[in-house]
Image: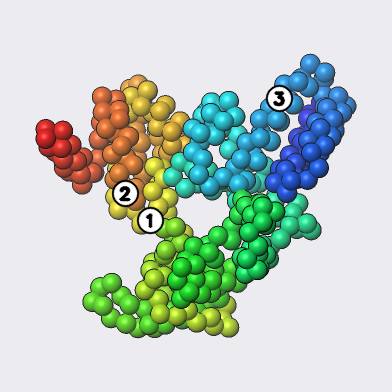
Amino acid sequence: MKKTARTALKVLISCLLALSVWKQLLNFDCKFSHNLRNALHLAAEILQPRETISMELGKLDRQLRLMVLLAGNSSLTNEEIASRLSLSKRSVYRYLEAFRDMGFVVERSGDIYRLDKNSPFFREISGGVMFTEDEAATVSQLLASVGDNSTRAKNLCRKLERIYDYKVLENHEADRRLAENTSRLYEAVKQHLTVVLKSYRSLHGGSVSDRIVEPYRFMNSNDDIRCYELASGQNKTFKISRIGEVGLLDVKWVAEPAHEEIYTDAFGFTGTPIDTISLRLTARAASLLCEEYPQARPFVADAGDGTSVFEDRVCSYLGAMRFVFGLYSDVEVAGSEKFMLFLKEKSVDLTLRFAK
């Protein structure tokens, strides 16, 4: 009976949590938060012993505030979020894992985490009351076109920017061609359409040609587009600034299984893996690695002698280098001659720089 009650409480709390996030993001009646707390308190009294009510509500309050921040986060690091909410970084990571277990999609860019608005949980709740991203973009463009600089219009734009991921359409406003090409690529990604990259100027050799591709991911602050090229059967990254014109084709993707997901390494770098590195860590270094870079946890193994070994592919040596240099007395490079050479070169550079 107690297990059933706890399960029911979790379901109720999850639903109320999600509703509360969207109510706050949409700036609904300020009484909502008070009513939410009353509802949770009543549910807790019914389903749980009284002595655990305060603890559950405190935890829920922290989860709720964290969820609100993550839903609109674009610049706050985990350390800044932890400071703002008076949480430890370890608690933030623990809540992130809980959100994943609840069905949220947690995105990571470097040390910045956010909740994807396309998470099934959000979509189910917001389907009847929220704009689609295209609709939000249209509202924003209409506001810009009428030249309304009132405080009300500016506030509305800020709310739209915080909730929706449509800024990809506006990153190149200064250049009409870039804006138009970006907009068409955005539509192609959303609709799973094939496109023609007309008059694409290759960086190698300077050749100009048309490329028929299936675009599926924006990269590097939306300056690049990751595509599957049908002619070569390869996944390639194209500079949007080198595209003459994007032509939308009335053809759906035919090679989606071949689309290569962009790999993000344990240190937050994205791209094609360049090497596999191996690090032998003291207990202190292993703990700090898993705390600072949670994605590294699955690749840390106990060596059986009081140390641990981290081994994984990396897209750049920079992240691993910073970690090694920061804990040089607790870390030993156990694999990858290329990485060792990279570290030696950087050490020489640092020595020469400080010698000056």
Residue 4 location, x and y as percent?
A: 81, 32
In this rendering, position of residue 346 left or right of residue 65: left
Residue 168 location, x and y as percent?
A: 53, 62
Q: State the residue position of label 3.
A: 58
Q: State the residue position of label 2.
A: 316
Q: State the residue position of label 1.
A: 271
Q: What kind of residue is marked 3?
A: Gly
Is the residue 331 above or below the residue 131 in the image? above
The tag earlier along the polypeptide, 3 or 1, is: 3
Q: Residue at x 42, y 26 (%)?
A: 287
Provide the secondary structure element on which disc 3 rests.
helix
From this viewpoint, which residue is outermost toward the top?
A: 51
| Residue 351 shows in the view | no
The tag earlier along the polypeptide, 3 or 2, is: 3
**Pointer 3 with pointer 2, Cβ within 8 A:** no
| Residue 3 picture quarter | top right
Is the residue 266 above or below the residue 289 in the image? below
Q: Residue at x 43, y 33 (%)?
A: 292
What label does residue 203 carry, if any? none
Q: What kind of residue is marked 2?
A: Ser
**Pointer 1 with pointer 2, Cβ within 8 A:** yes
